[in-house]
Image: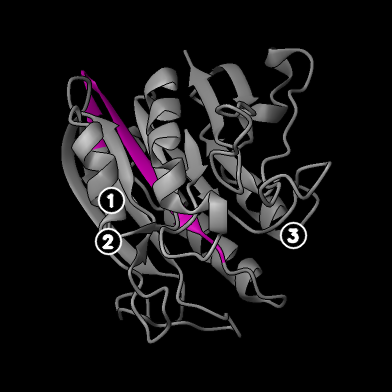
Amino acid sequence: MSFNIRYATAQDGHNHWDNRREAVLGCIRRINPDLLGLQECRLDGQIQDVMNDLHEYGWFGEPRGGESDSALEMTPVLYRRDRFQAIDNGNFWLSKSPTVSGSRSWGAWLPRTLTWVRLRDGERRLLFANTHFDHFPGKAREKSAEMVKTWTRNRSEDEACILTGDFNASKESEPYRILTDALPDPFRDPRLGERPAEGSFHGFGLLNSPLPIDWVLASSELIPQRAWVEEGRTEGDWLSDHHPVVVEFL
């Protein structure tokens, strides 16, 4: 499951995090994902709100850093401890200096990161990664996609890979083409039959046709059984400015 939960300090009026928190957590509990990638989740209270409720999950994340008000935002990865054993984890910046906190390149407006955890599921190994690409027009998303593609291809041959994220790009874009060359899109797997709806970003209902900028991508050995965008609301209120994106694999 991939879910941009909208950062808690945003001045969103009625849609402020304090008013959405219980609905967001209720949605996650209802779907009950084994793996969860969050975007725009802040270290100064928001992740604590999440983990105080989701006790059965382990998590890892690092703030993206920098000098902006968004320096404490993360792309944390969560995994169910009753299914997975965490072997290793890490984080790197989508820049020419991937080990330097707060670094940014290629005209990116903000620092951007990829967070990952290596898991053991019985005899199987899985690399689960989560990211949030830059929103500013330019080359940053394409360069980030190339960087992530190379990184996923350098994983061990004996492990599958799942990548979640808010990519700030449509499925007709160059970043999508780059990444799906390495990790197919389960939403477009012909074994699912009719293609599911893909629109996820709606801006708290401002867009009649949500944009498909939140993706779940996975290596080909993982067979999708179901894929959908969770469009539910709570008593008429939006959970976030993005819908969660969910895939079930065999």
Other residues around mark 2 within 10 Å, as few (<14) / some (14–19) / many (≥20): some
Establish if 171 lies above or below 124.
Answer: below
**Highlighted range, magenta:** 119-133
Residue at the spot 74% in from the left edge and 19% down from the top edge? 190
- Secondary structure, mark 1, is helix
What residue is disc 2 on?
43
The answer for how far apart the CA atoms under marks 1 and 3 are is 32 Å
Establish if 225 lies above or below 138.
Answer: above
Residue at the spot 58% in from the left edge and 45% down from the top edge? 182
For the residue marked with disc 3, what is the amino acid?
Answer: Glu
Residue at the spot 75% in from the left edge and 52% down from the top edge? 170
Residue 29 position in % (x across, y down): 37, 23
Q: Nearer the viewer, mark 1 or mark 3?
A: 1
* Image quadrant assignment for residue 139: bottom right
* Depth order, front residue of 143/23: 23
The answer for how far apart the CA atoms under marks 2 and 1 are is 6 Å
